[in-house]
Amino acid sequence: MRNSSLSLVAASGAVVSELGHPCLRGLDDLFQPLDTLLASGGDDRLTVAPGSRLNMYGCAGAPRTEAIELSSSTASSISAPALERLCRAREQIIERGTIDGFDDALDQHIEHSRESLRIYLGLSGSGAEVVFSPSGTDSQLHALFLAEAVLGGPLTTVVVGADQTGSGTAFTARGRHFNRRTGMGKAVIKGAPLCDYPNAFAAVDVPFATSTGAWHSLSEIDDCVTCAVEEEIRKGRKVLLQAMHASKFGLRGPSDACLEELCSRWPNDVLVVVDACQARIGRAKTRRYLDRGYALLVTGSKFYMGPPFSGALLVPKRLSAFIAAGSFSLGALNAYLDRSCLPSGWRRLRGQFALVPNPGQWLRWEAALEEMRLYDMLPLPFRSAVMSRLQTSIPNLITTSKHLMPLALPAELMPRDAADEEFVSATIFPFLIRTNDTYAPLNWAKALCETLNVADGALGRHGAGDDIGRPCHIGQPVALPLPGGIETAAPRICVGARNLFEAWSTGADPVEAAVQAILQDVDVAVRQLDRLAERLS
């Protein structure tokens, strides 16, 4: 598409949702500015503040070439290559839409995106199906109602790592609306149940840590999960076991052995869905989960650094075939699903939903797929070597600061094996902030990170080539209790796909060059954080 079209605002058929947000649905809507399109078809979390032009995650609807992006555990702004792909994709849909009609053209393109996602995840030919959604939180709802349709009810979700997952899980696990507006622009009551069946859904939370901040052992988590599943089945309920593959800190649980045992004992009563929304998961591990019959929650907006939001539910071959052949009613998801979200092979289920494609959701996934394509070009040995080096170097660099200290994580809750491939190394590095001999509380840590993300030179510069004052976007602070009743929060410095791709070079030692390039950005962020903490202490 010509560059001039990026600012074109045509007479649009866009409608406004009950809450006053744009709900873009027609062909004319694709002529809206791209930042408007990228913020459409989601919930309130995508709303951009008028002044900063950033959403609640600190992301913009255009490339932030001036900023250092180390925020992939939360969300990232769109990159220039992804924006270029959106322009091309938008032009293709407009051309096809004028011939075949917008709805059909977009539906066909989304089906092609399904196969692209399978290819980048190493799942081509696996028979796994993809259910797209605006966010990982939406995909949790999709998994819940599909599990209830397959297993029957009433249904209890056992949420592992409940203290290390998204805030919306507390609602989705119980079959409740998690926001005031859905991705389809429907106004709903946050916290209200999606269906009116008494006791249809319940949840049991299994946290990684105690209320005083002490970490549970992996065996303790296995025991808690087993007891919870046994108790719910004893009550006559079915169980959706939501395992955690990589939490906000990169933690996992329960063990693979625990999952296998529970599925073996109750094959008709337990369905496992793996929360891999961070997308910090090797191809071999993804295939292993699916081969065992587990569903997976993934996103393109965390590790792969596509713009927020882009969610998907990966459904294993056997379960997909069962759904395709069955007659299920998922009317409760009318506010969260349109026909194009569902794979074409699920004809009966698709027939229950209107074809109301979501251009914003599709464009965000298009951007994420470009980030995945670029990352997929990097040799696996290069990715593995860089991550291995950074796993030690980044905490060491954080340690050199006056006010920051790496958060000690339990190695037992970060189990790794060969199937993890490059993710055998950590890519999320949480840290604590100390000022005046105390740990920074959550609101203080949030303010510091927000200031860091919009730094404009107020911190001062030391000379030519010094990046002090450059905006740095890092992962949002996670509330964390500590022994002794101390309440604090841990921000996170993260390594994502784009960081590796942008650091790639073809020189004599590409690994060393990439490690130094990424560490240079981390050093800038650490020094600025240290300076901000010093000023506020």
Image (cartoon, rainbow, N blue to C red):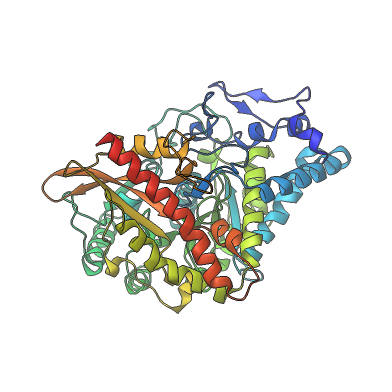
Residue extending furthest bottom? 418
- Which residue shows up at 38% across the image and 60% down it? 250
Q: Is residue 279 left or right of residue 3?
A: left
Q: Is residue 265 above or below residue 66?
A: below
Residue extending furthest front? 463
Q: Position of residue 256 (x, y in %)?
A: 36, 72
- Which residue shows up at 50% across the image and 74% down it? 385
- Quadrant where the N terminus sits is top right
Quadrant position of residue 389: bottom left
Q: Position of residue 278 (x, y in %)?
A: 46, 56
321, 59: nearer the viewer = 59
Q: Position of residue 210 (x, y in %)?
A: 19, 53
Q: Is residue 525 left or right of residue 324?
A: left
- Quadrant where the C terminus sits is top left
Visible residue check, residue 251: no
Q: Is residue 307 above or below residue 335?
A: below
Q: Is residue 43 left or right of residue 119?
A: left
Visible residue check, residue 493: yes
441, 297: nearer the viewer = 441
Q: Is residue 441 above or below residue 313?
A: above
Quadrant position of residue 435: top left
Quadrant position of residue 316: bottom right
Q: Is residue 522 above or below residue 172?
A: below
